[in-house]
Structures are given as structure tokens and as C-alpha cells.
Image (spheres, grey):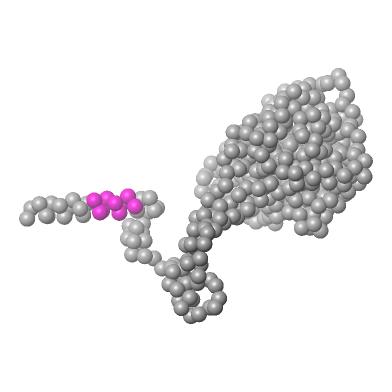
Amino acid sequence: MSSSKTISPAPATPIPDISATHARLRATFRSHKTRPVEWRKQQLRKLWWGLHDNENDIAAALWQDLRKSEHEALQSDGIWLKNAIIDALGDIDSWVKEVPITADLLSKAGSPTIRKEPLGVVLIIGAYNYPFQLTLGPLLGAIAAGNCVVIKPSEISQASCAILTKIITESLDPDAFAVVNGAIPETTELLEQKFDKICYTGNGVVGRIVATAAAKHLTPTILELGGLNPVIITKNADIKLAARRICWGKALNAGQVCLSPDYAIVPSSKEAEFVSSLASTWRKFYPNGLKASPDYPRIVNDRHFQRIKKLIDSTSGEIKIGGQTDESEKFIDLTVVKVKDENDALMKDEIFGPVLPYVVIDDLDEAIEFVNRVSDTPLALYTFTTDKKEANYILGHTRSGGATVNDTIWHGASHKLAFGGVGESGMGNYRDKFGFDAFSHHRTTVRQPGGWFEMVLDARYPPYIPSKLSQYRMLLEKKPNFSRDGKARVSWFGWLLSLGGGDKKTVVVKYVATILGMIYFLRILFLSQ
Ligand code: NAD
């Protein structure tokens, strides 16, 4: 798709307006305007129409910023968001419901519940690579939960930022939602304000700046960061399938995806097939070459183009596929490089571009050790193996924000699944109900019975005479089901269940069958007398 019109960038928000905007939203929140669920639904419905009516502009903006095809643009930003809204609208009534909690005897009479309350005024800071999804995605949860929201789109994808601003200001209630545009000075001013939660998507360096600013106000944060996402290919992998799925995950948005595979580990027996399968898949995906293909995006700006080019120039590995770049178009070829170890320039940081280094390691435990040494908390981990036990072994010996077995990106592709990092790749998660919960306060509430209940509560009041403590112990003190050496004590019933081994279900079936057998036997015995 190439658009004839050029979308102009949105002007930066004047710095003095930022605190005034924050104060306006705070006043709206205090007016309780955002509390009614119907009001929240209306905002979501209007946002759906805003996205729908501006679909062409969304595609045009993503083409202008990243030369992203209409197919990718609508799949991952336009349609993706619209579906997420429709699902949220279908489920919001169940999300907002007060949830009863199973409590101990003493609290039961107060019918304890969890109320899902809005947090207040929250800030969402988006990133450039999926400017619509990563900014409006968290916004859906924040609206559903009844918050006022300041939205700060990434200034890097300028056209998308302008269209985002248009959609938000035309669709949502301006008393409760505001866009702040600009770069570091505007974001710094925003971070001076006290928010009730900040959701930041971007790199870890700025993530630390955001977390430090938030800490001054005791503001909790969701940090959606990146990392070095490994792909462990084992000797039991279907290599052709792995290559096809890695190609797709690596070429998506020209590698400018937080979930993009960052490096692969391949056993020596599969190396040749792996490289040739990658090359033949790319030829199939882009029959006229990558540069000529309208399906292959470009790097977002010169700074990022130079950063990735420098990485390719400074690798001491062997370039097996690609390697070409064109500064005039910010084009970087899909590039596969065989590297010796983690000291290579390509293995130091997240690449965030279309380059895939790989190392050859034969032993699986060595591969796992390598992954944990390079970065033990990436955003994503991928493994390709046809052996389920092997996949579970890998999952059980590594950490990551999310993981996909036998594919790339997929655990992060659905608007229904929780999305978030761990350790260096971030904290917290959102999307669908997880997003609603992330922007809600879970307020434990007890509604204590009236005067008659004093009789029951008597034991808690002074004077603390010994009989009150005995009464308390008798009624409420629990007995341990474990011994001093930390072992669980098994009841006779539990012991019976464990006889014969098997999982719990099998044992219950065996147990019921035995009881029925005994009844039958006793019946025959009884009838024969
Ligand atoms: P970016 O340059 O668009 O910056 C992100 C946001 O940070 C922007 O809104 C920008 O205005 C703001 N910002 C920049 N400098 C700042 C400063 N000094 N103080 C305050 N705010 C500042 O995006 P980026 O950071 O280059 O994005 C790429 C990174 O983001 C990669 O590491 C990628 O893995 C990560 N990412 C993570 C996710 C996720 O969901 N986990 C998604 C996309 C990108």
C-alpha cells in the first residue's frame, strides 16, 4: 500500500498544559463520572467505531512510519484492537462483579468480597513499533476498569501518533481521556505528576527512568520491556517447519517486534538443513526479493537503521544469508549469521531488527546453560522439538515472560492472553481480563453483621481473661497436618487413595470400584445367610 497523502506529525503538547490536563482528569475521576459500567461501555463502543472509521488512515500511517503492509497493519493493529474491544464489551459485566471470598470461620459472617474498583488517573506510554496496539491495548483495560487516562504515544512513529491522537480525541470523553504528545521533555513533565498507575512499553533504559519517577509518588508500574529472545532447536525438531515459523517471526515488522526471535541455537547435525530451509522459505515468502516486496517493512528511522547496520558490520561471525542494507530506503535484508559464542556484537543486546545470529550447540543442557547465561529473563522463549518431554524439560529449566513451543511470537499474538515480561523484560501484564485487573484495585470488603454479632465477637474485647483465649483456641486454632521435619502427615483416607499409585483421578476410580465391590460382596454374603 502506498498512500498519496502525507500525514503530518501531531504538534507537541505545550509543557504548561500537562499539569493542567492531569488536574482536569483528576477532577473528573473525583466526580465519579467514570464509575458507571454503562459509561465505560459507551467509551469502548465509540473507540471501536473510531478505529473502524479510521482504518484506512491507520494503514496509511503505518505505511508511512514503517512501510508496513496493509495486511500486517490491520491484522496486528486495526482488526486486533477492534476484536479486543468486542470481547471486552462481552465480558465486562462479569469482570466488574464483586467476587465472594471463601473465608475463615471468624470472617464468614461478614460475607467478605473483592470489589473491583478503578485506580484513578493512569498514564500509558506507548512504543513506536506497534503504535496503535501497544498504546490502545492497555487503554482498553484501563477504560473497562473505570479510570481516567493520559495517553502518551511514541513520537518516533510520527504519522501513527497523529492518527492515534485524532482517534482518541474524536472518540473518547475529553473530561476523562487526554493525549499528550512530544518527546523527552513532555514525558519528563508527565512523570512529575502523580499517577495511580503507569504502563510503559519500550526499552529497559527508559523503563528504569519511568520506574524511578513513579517510585517518588509510590506509583505502581507495568513495564513492558524487551530482551534477547532465544530459539532452542533440538535434534528432535522438524527443521523445515521450524525455519518457516522462525522466518515469519523474524520478518514480521522487519524484526522490530519485542517478541522477535533474537538468536537461535542449533545442533550441528541440523545446521545445514536449518540454513538452507531459512533461505528457501524466504525465497517463497518474497519471490521477487525482499527489497521489491510490498510485504517487507523498513526500519523506523535513521538512528535505528545505523544501529542495526553497525551490529552487522561489527559481527565477527559468518554471514550465511543476506547482509545487504540500503540507507536511502532504511532497508535491511533478512540476515542470518553464524556466531561463535555470546561475546559476538550481535549477542550483546536485543537486536530489534531483521538479523538472526545462531550458535551451534549439540548438548541440550549446554544450550539451556547458554540461554540462561546470555539473559535469564527474556520476554519470550521459543523451542522447536517434536518431543513433548524435551519441551517441558526446556520450559522447566529456563525463565521468560512467555513461551511458545514449535512456533514464534504466537503466545503474544492473541488479544485474549496475558502479555508481559519477567525480570529484565518487565513486570506486570495486561490484555483482556488481565488488563482489566491490572488497572483495577481489588478492594477487600467485609460487611459485618449488627449488634447481635457482639455475642460472637465478645472474645476479641478486653479484658483478656484466660477463658476468652481458651474459647478462641477451641473454636479457631487449626491443627497442622505436617511433622517437625517438614513432612506432610497423610490421613488414612489419603493413604488409601495413594495405594496402588496412579494419578488422583485413577486412584479415586479404583477406590470407588473397591467400595462397590465390597458392598456387592457383603450383599451376597448377607443374602446367602
Ligand atoms: P520508543 O523510542 O518509541 O520509546 C518508548 C516510549 O518511551 C516513547 O513514548 C518515548 O516518548 C518514551 N521515552 C523515550 N525516552 C524517554 C525518556 N528519557 N524519558 C521518558 N520517556 C522517554 O521505543 P523504544 O524504547 O525504542 O522501543 C523498543 C524497545 O521496546 C525494545 O526493547 C522492545 O523490545 C521494547 N518493546 C517492548 C514491548 C512489550 O510489550 N514488552 C513492545 C514493544 C517494544
Residue toward you, 513 or 465: 465
Residue toward you, 415 or 225: 415
x, y (%) of residue 347?
76, 49
Q: Main secondary structure of the magenta part?
A: helix
Q: In this orientation, does residue 310 appear?
A: no
Quadrant of res 25? top right
Q: Residue at x 82, y 41 (%)?
A: 152
Magenta segment, which residues? Answer: 508-516
Q: How many marks?
A: 0
x, y (%) of residue 264?
68, 44
Q: Is residue 85 magenta?
A: no
Residue toward you, 350 or 108: 108
Q: Residue at x 79, y 45 (%)?
A: 27
- Name the quadrant of the N terminus: top right
Image side of residue 258 versus residue 410, left or right: right
Q: Residue at x 82, y 21 (%)?
A: 2
Q: Is residue 432 above or below residue 82?
A: below
